[in-house]
Image (cartoon, grey):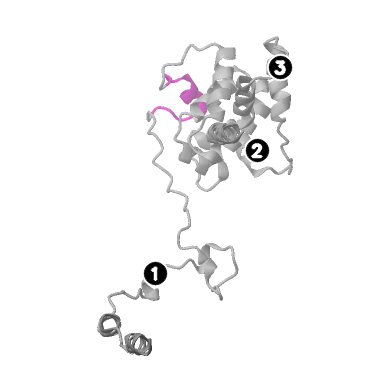
Amino acid sequence: MLRSLVGQTRTLARPCTRSLAHSATRRARPSTRVCSDSSDERIHPALVKDPPVANPSSATDPWTIKTPPMPEPPKLDPSIKTMDDLVNSPHPEGRDHEETETLRKRLVYESRKRGILEMDLILSTFAKERLPEMNDRQLREYDRFLTLPDWTIFYYVTGKAEAPEPWKSSQVLHELRHHSANKGKTLDQPPTTATEASKLASYNKKSTISSREIQTSVRLILPGELSKHAISEGTNAVTKFSSTK
């Protein structure tokens, strides 16, 4: 029994050559990890401890979204000097003989479905306020104004660029500038989705509100891309809620 105890003691005291060699190799092996240089990484100035200026500020944001330059306005016939000449000239989309009420409805749609959000908001609220009162001549002048590129309209309406003739003397452009400036400081309170949906359900003689009425009311309340985004987010939320039940 004493012999067995001595053997066990020798076994425990014997160093493990494999583990020692492995640890020595690890200590001798050079590090292959590449230390990233902090100077190469673009850290947003808003995340540093001592920002150069107060946040938020365009001076601290290296990725600001800048307004694109105004595109070249479409060239008109040299014989067109006044707005009357432009209105009486052939329509670029062949809508010369469109009826007044049909024109009014189309302009409501085109005012709300612009290519950029800024003009969606300005033109949709302007159409809601002014289009019902416009006569045929004013509607056709406004129609010609909407044939311009969206960014050109934005620069003219906000006063960031001076409109050339015949737009410079346009009464519609003058009203649009006054509307975009919001000098009356009015706060537009849109109707609720439930109110519009209930009106649509009542019009369609339905006793309950379905998803179709909800989506249609969202399109009526929100202009352009906002309505598409709202419907998409609402659909995703409903799908997620249904899948968790």
Q: Is residue 82 magenta?
A: yes
Q: Which residues are magenta?
A: 79-91
Residue 124 in view of the camera: yes
Give above or below for 39 relative to 231. Answer: below
In front here: 134 or 20?
20
Residue 145 at x, y = what percent?
A: 51, 30
> Which three-letter amino acid code belongs to the residue tagged 1?
Glu
Neighbourhood count class around disc 2 (C-alpha, 10 Å): few under 14, some 14–19, many 20 upward: some
- Image spot of residue 74 (x, y percent): 39, 34
SS at badge 2 = helix
Dot 3 corresponds to which residue? 208
At 73% across and 44% down in the image, what residue appears?
185
Check whether the beta carbons of the residues at disc 2 and disc 3 lie within 8 A of each other.
Answer: no
Per the rendering, the mark at residue 179 is 2
**Residue 223: image x %, image y %?**
58, 32
Q: Quadrant of residue 56?
A: bottom right
Judging by the rendered image, the residue that carries numbered circle 1 is: 41
174 or 54: which is nearer to us? 54
Q: Which image quarter holds the N terminus? A: bottom left
Q: How many marks?
A: 3
Residue at 73%, 40% in the rendered image = 187
Mark 3 residue element: loop
Q: Nearer the viewer, mark 2 or mark 1?
A: 1
Q: Are the residues tagged 2 and 1 within 8 Å (C-beta)?
A: no
* Three-letter amino acid code at the position of disc 3: Thr
